[in-house]
Image: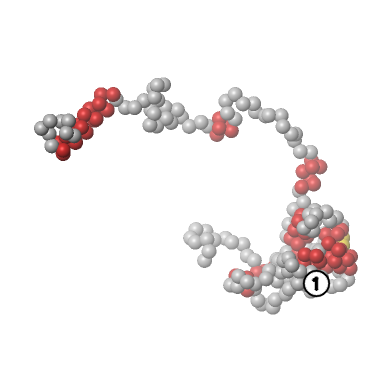
Amino acid sequence: MNGLAGVGDSEAAWVFCTLVVAVFLACGSPESVDGTDSLNPRAASPEPSRQERAVPAGWPQRFGYGREAARQEIAAWDIDVRPDGRGLPTASGSVREGARLYRARCAVCHGETGVEGPDYPLVGRIADDAFPFGSDPGAIETIGSYWPYATTLFDYIRRTMPYSAPGSLTPEEVYAVVAYLLFLNELVTEEAVLDHRTLPAVRMPARDRFVPDDRRGGAEVR
């Protein structure tokens, strides 16, 4: 600030700021070359509609890739099974056949008895009046102690097992493996044959331990 003769540092600073403000006001508000506000470029252009965002200007409605799925193709993926049994295929499988399939396709991961395998244990029961899973993070969630619906077991095995070839089991084989696992968990007899009518009738020990979460507002966990 020594270039301003006879003016102190504080006074020189004030004069400099005054000059900057004067130049700014003389030039007006900053605008881009097209007249829009360069500090707020959206001020002069409204937000595009949802349809405009979905299909940019100049783009075709369709690109010609693929085709609509046929009903048969959709049906092949529409295999979910509900707790009441809706969605179960018309087939059947026995405990005895399930024992053979389990040894051939499942035991390598889950062990010969469903307990001692390197992967997730499948067999185990707890007392009928016990349900420690909310208070004991270390409790083992087996088929016999935790799963509320036998039909969910069918749905899960058909989609994901065996690990090396998920979805490769036929409906008859899935019924048989489910029957054997329920037998190992002492939920059906050794002579049991399961199908789309008898499987939903198997009542799991944890069936009444799950209730709908109808809380409204407040903390998620109480």
Which residue appears at 38% of the width and 31% of the height? Answer: 39
Tally of numbered discs = 1
In-image side of 211 versus 48 (left or right): right
The colouring scheme, among rainbow, by chain, secondary structure or one colour, is secondary structure
Which residue appears at 49% of the width and 61% of the height? Answer: 219
The image position of residue 102, as x and y in percent, is: 84, 65
Mark 1 nearby-residue class (10 Å; few <14, some 14–19, many ≥20): some
The image position of residue 167, as x and y in percent, is: 80, 53
Residue linked to disc 1: 113
Q: Quadrant of the rendered structure where residue 40 is?
A: top left
The image position of residue 222, as x and y in percent, is: 52, 66
| Residue at the front extreme of this rendering | 2
Q: Is residue 66 above or below residue 126?
A: above
Q: Is residue 127 above or below residue 83?
A: below
Of 148 and 7, the residue lying toward us: 7
Label 1, secondary structure: give it. Answer: loop
Which residue appears at 74% of the width and 34% of the height? Answer: 66
Which residue appears at 41% of the width and 21% of the height? Answer: 34
Of 216 and 180, the residue lying toward us: 180
Tell me if I can see residue 82 in this picture: yes
The image position of residue 194, as x and y in percent, is: 84, 64
Q: Is residue 79 above or below residue 130?
A: above
Q: Amino acid at mark 1?
A: Thr
Q: Is residue 111 above or below residue 51?
A: below
